[in-house]
Image: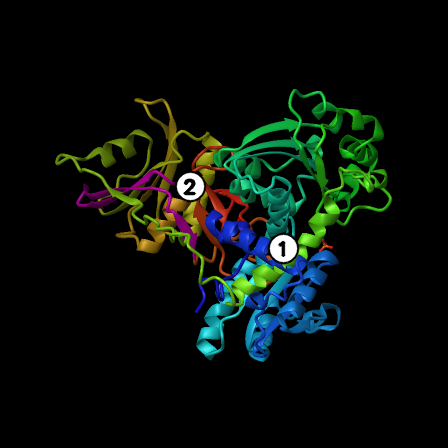
Amino acid sequence: MAFFSGRSLSIINDLNVEEQWYLYQKTRELKEGLAAGKTMEDFRIKDEDFSMYLLFLEDSTRTKESFRNAAAFHGARVNVFDSTHSSFNKKESLTDTIKMLVGYAGRSLFIIRSKQEGTCTALSESISEYAHKQKLPTPAFINAGDGKHEHPTQELLDEFTFLEKKNWDRSIIRIALVGDLFHGRTVHSKADGLRIFDEVHVDLVAPPELAMPEYYVHRMKANGFKVRIFTSIEEYLEAKEIADIWYYTRLQLERMGEKVLDKAESLRKAVTFQKKYLSKIQDGTKFYHPLPRHREYPVVPTFLDHTELNGWDEQSMNGYFTRITEIAMFGGKIGDDFKGSETAKEVFNDDFIEELEIHSSSSENKKTDMKIGIRPVENGLVIDHIGKGNTISQIWSHIDKIRRILNLNTVASHGVYKSNRTGLYKGIISLPEINDFSDTDVKKLGAIAPECTVNIIRDSKIIRKVRVHMPPRIYNFDEISCRNENCISNPELHEPIVPYFFRSNQGSSGTTGEFICKYCEKPHQFQEIWSDK
Ligand code: CP
């Protein structure tokens, strides 16, 4: 079985840099071969049991048609799913729909465009499990654009185009990303996709309302990119060094509702190229755009179509070649000659409970509790150091969450006090009727109030004391959910997807302790993931 067979592509990082490079090299071989009149038989799947499902739940021209034509190149059976006349109208879930289609498809590859973010990540897991149980071939999934999250196959065709422009020199790229960087999924994929180049200089050109989300800016910096920020093309053209690759995105003001109506003209003006700027553009510069462009308000105006700046026409054609290669890889036709390394699976250290030393004469529980009027515990639990260093109201909120989520409807006392030693506030809950916590409860505690301590008390003595750190993964709790209303795991969407969060080593603002939704990758403060109800 070929190396890439059955793999899914939900985000650009599902292929590591060596794998992406393989894809670009293969696409180059294919494109040059076809241009030379070769039939490129080594790329063609030609297996009548292989089928492709095109599920476009949002409009598309380029992605859908390039995949449809790429499928024809392979002789694959193509099913174009008609979502407007499907049982979605009877409120069927996407998961149920795909389960059923997998049963009809044989060996299959699903190309899915969806407003819901993280759709392919969720489906590739849940449907693989289902297929395995039903003894069906495991389907592969390719994300053809999910909300404002990512568009990995666009990213692959974009990088392929940049490599062509640079005559396959990977040493350095200077690129300006211009337009709606907030909603544009194609520019979000660039935070990782540009890693194909050794040195990356990115200039972000967008007014504050359309600025790149902090999360992606931080990711670019963490990837070692040099990032500069400008609020308009006019401002950018005053800079010392201007990129020779400009990547525009369409303004998606329709997603911003009424709040930008009165600003629409100035937002457009900030990122629309004008004739007067031409003299400031260096020779050899190319403009790119994932397209479509707005026919009334194009950020790349049509007077540029017949100039040397036009890189977008070649770029859109490259979508056909890169997608033939993607199908050949994930359909198992090519990949045996891949010489790079596989991405190592991330290993999680679930060791988030730290045993603390107990001093033999310890009656600290009793003393401390009495100091603030908390009832002393002879036998039971004391949760201490809750929200240490937070504000008083934040600590009360932690206490409330702990009691509510851990269902501590028992005799208890609690309070917020100030440490004499550090001057910091912290919370305490004293639970005389609780004798132990389950591992699940301790994990919840670590996620709600990381760095708190749990003291188990017998005969007024602390017999065990642990500090609970924030766990690296949180899942399988009824009380957690992703706050992104467009995330496939959001409970309002009623898909049978288990909410799942990873702790980020570095948060979107460079701090530790954020939780990233596994599906849509939205960062959350740890308090946010817990339901308020
Ligand atoms: N670039 C792109 O995704 O275009 P479509 O919306 O036409 O597929």
The CA distance from mark 2 to mark 1 is: 65 Å
The residue shown at (69%, 71%) is 81
Left or right: where 253 falls relative to 482: right
Q: Quadrant of the N terminus?
A: bottom left
Closest to the observer: 415 or 533? 533
Instruction: Give residue 94's position: percent from left, percent from top.
Output: 61, 67
Left or right: where 450 falls relative to 295: left
Left or right: where 479 falls relative to 374: right
Q: Is residue 490 visible?
A: no
Where disc 1 sits, the SS reads helix
Instruction: Give residue 186's position: percent from left, percent from top.
Output: 64, 46
Asked if the magenta segment contains residue 471, the reply would be yes
Kindly report the secondary structure that dominates the magenta region of the rendered protein. Answer: strand
Q: Indicate the amino acid at tag 1.
A: Glu
Instruction: Give residue 76's position: percent from left, percent from top.
Output: 62, 73
Q: Is residue 164 above or below residue 240?
A: below
Q: Within the image, what quadrant is residue 104 found in?
A: bottom right
Asked if the magenta segment contains residue 144, the reply would be no
Instruction: Give residue 349's position: percent from left, percent from top.
Output: 32, 48
Judging by the rendered image, the residue that carries numbered circle 2 is 399
Quadrant of the image where one finds ligand 1: bottom right
What is the number of the mark on residue 32? 1
Q: Indicate the amino acid at tag 2.
A: Ile
Colouring: rainbow
The residue furthest left is 360
Closest to the observer: 283 or 445? 283
Within 10 Å of disc 2 (Cα), the crowding (few <14, some 14-19, many 20+) is: many
Q: Within the image, what quadrant is residue 106 found in?
A: bottom right
Residues drawn in magenta: 448-475
